[in-house]
Amino acid sequence: MHTPSTRALSALAYERGEDYDPGQPPAPDLLGDLELAGQAHPIVDEAGPADRRRRRDRERRRALAAIPEWFSADDLIAAPWETAHRELI
């Protein structure tokens, strides 16, 4: 665990309704709260927007990777002699 800054200790003491003097050692209960907060695990119930976007992008890349290498976009463009009625334009 890294050493908290005086600004972080001051903010924590303010939230607890206590006074904090950087020249004095922190109160033991304040240190106990910091220790508990350092061991806490994040609570995540579902994927956030960034995770959902990453998942969509990954699925798109997999779908594009499924296109054969020999395939070209030119295969989708009809030549002038390949019309619906087989007539030259």
Image (cartoon, rainbow, N blue to C red):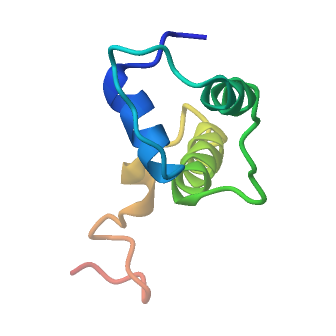
Along the line of sight, which residue is nearer the eye, 38 or 56?
38
Residue displayed at 38% across by 80% down: 83
Q: Quadrant of residue 87?
A: bottom left
Residue displayed at 27% across by 78% down: 88
Q: Tell me where residue 70 appears, x and y as whole percent.
A: 54, 33
Q: Quadrant of the C terminus?
A: bottom left
Vertical position of residue 5 compared to residue 9: above or below = above
Q: Tell me where residue 48 appears, x and y as whole percent.
A: 60, 57
Residue displayed at 52% across by 21% down: 26
Vertical position of residue 22 compared to residue 62: above or below = above
- Return the residue found at the far top: 2
Residue displayed at 63% across by 28% down: 34
Vertical position of residue 25 compared to residue 59: above or below = above
Left or right of 4 on screen, residue 23: left
Left or right of 11 on screen, residue 44: right
Along the line of sight, which residue is nearer the eye, 79 or 43?
43
Q: Tell me where residue 30 appears, x and y as whole percent.
A: 61, 31
Q: Quadrant of residue 1?
A: top right
Vertical position of residue 36 compared to residue 54: above or below = above
Left or right of 30 on screen, residue 73: left
Along the line of sight, which residue is nearer the eye, 61 or 51?
51
Q: Tell me where residue 19 appears, x and y as whole percent.
A: 41, 40
Along the line of sight, which residue is nearer the eye, 89 or 18?
18
